[in-house]
Image (tube, helix red, strand yellow):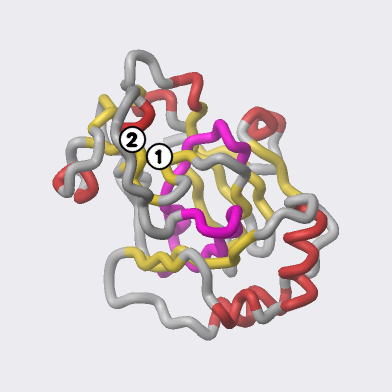
């Protein structure tokens, strides 16, 4: 699979790399959290990361213009696409090592389906503050070849990815709601699909270790 840097012009329609943030304290706090024995872990908000108070305030005031945010982390070992999701609001990703994001655009969804051939693999460097736009579809990061796992801080509007609200499904998008402020499209091969997530990814389930 071809990999493209988040510092390239191609990334500009998916997001941008924010400058002027001292993320060293955040990276140090993230590195203190052990990788899981296998698979991927995710927590929407982690006290030790939000305790980096100067940076937390900068994320709140500068990156999100004063809106409340949460700082959590996705960490573990992953090379597959599995699903794509989106939120109301942008997301920041900051890794303790280089990592890979598999991204597509919401406009690539047609009749409730998205072909995985439209997914692009972007590489980010350690410490990059990578903002992905609201209409950029994404999911769990992947580790880069030669690196044992990943730790990626995830900054989102406060409350995102917590308990799903109880709603009556009245339209197609309602059927994608998987958690609070989280709309999800799954590949049939994923565990999320087996748990009842909407299957909308067609084509092969991308695995960057083999594709």
Q: Which residues are magenta?
A: 132-160
Residue at mark 1: 183
Q: Quadrant of the N terminus?
A: top left
Tell me, for residue 105, which label it has, or none: none
Q: Position of residue 24 (x, y in %)?
A: 72, 75
Q: Position of residue 71 (x, y in %)?
A: 59, 66
Assess whether residue 149 is covered by the magenta stretch.
yes
Helix, strand or loop status at disc 2: helix
Residue 147 appears anywhere in the view: no
Snapshot quadrant of residue 126: bottom right
Residue 110 vertical placement versus 149 (above, below): above
98 is within the stretch colored magenta: no
Quarter in which the C terminus is drawn: top left
Callout 1 environment at 10 Å: few (<14), some (14 to 19), or many (20+)? many
Q: Judging from the image, what secondary structure is the residue with disc 1 in?
A: strand
Give the number of callouts.
Answer: 2
């Amino acid at each position: 699979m071809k990999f493209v840097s988040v510092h390239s012009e191609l990334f500009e329609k998916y997001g941008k790399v924010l400058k002027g943030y001292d993320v060293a304290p955040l990276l140090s706090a993230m590195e203190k959290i052990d990788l899981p024995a296998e698979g991927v872990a995710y927590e929407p908000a982690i006290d030790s990361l939000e305790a980096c108070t100067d940076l937390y305030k900068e994320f709140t005031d500068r990156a999100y213009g004063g809106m409340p945010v949460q700082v959590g982390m996705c960490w573990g070992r992953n090379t597959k696409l599995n699903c794509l999701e989106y939120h109301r609001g942008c997301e920041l990703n900051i890794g303790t090592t280089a990592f890979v994001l598999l991204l597509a655009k919401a406009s690539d969804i047609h009749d409730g389906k998205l072909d995985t051939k439209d997914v692009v693999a972007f590489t980010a460097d350690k410490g990059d503050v990578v903002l992905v736009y609201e209409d950029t579809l994404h999911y769990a990061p992947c580790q880069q070849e030669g690196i044992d796992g990943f730790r990626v801080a995830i900054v989102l509007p406060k409350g995102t990815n917590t308990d799903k609200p109880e709603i009556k499904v009245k339209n197609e998008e309602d059927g994608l709601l998987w958690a609070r402020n989280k709309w999800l499209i799954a590949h049939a091969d994923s565990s999320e699909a087996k748990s009842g997530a909407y299957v909308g990814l067609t084509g092969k389930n991308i695995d960057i270790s083999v594709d």
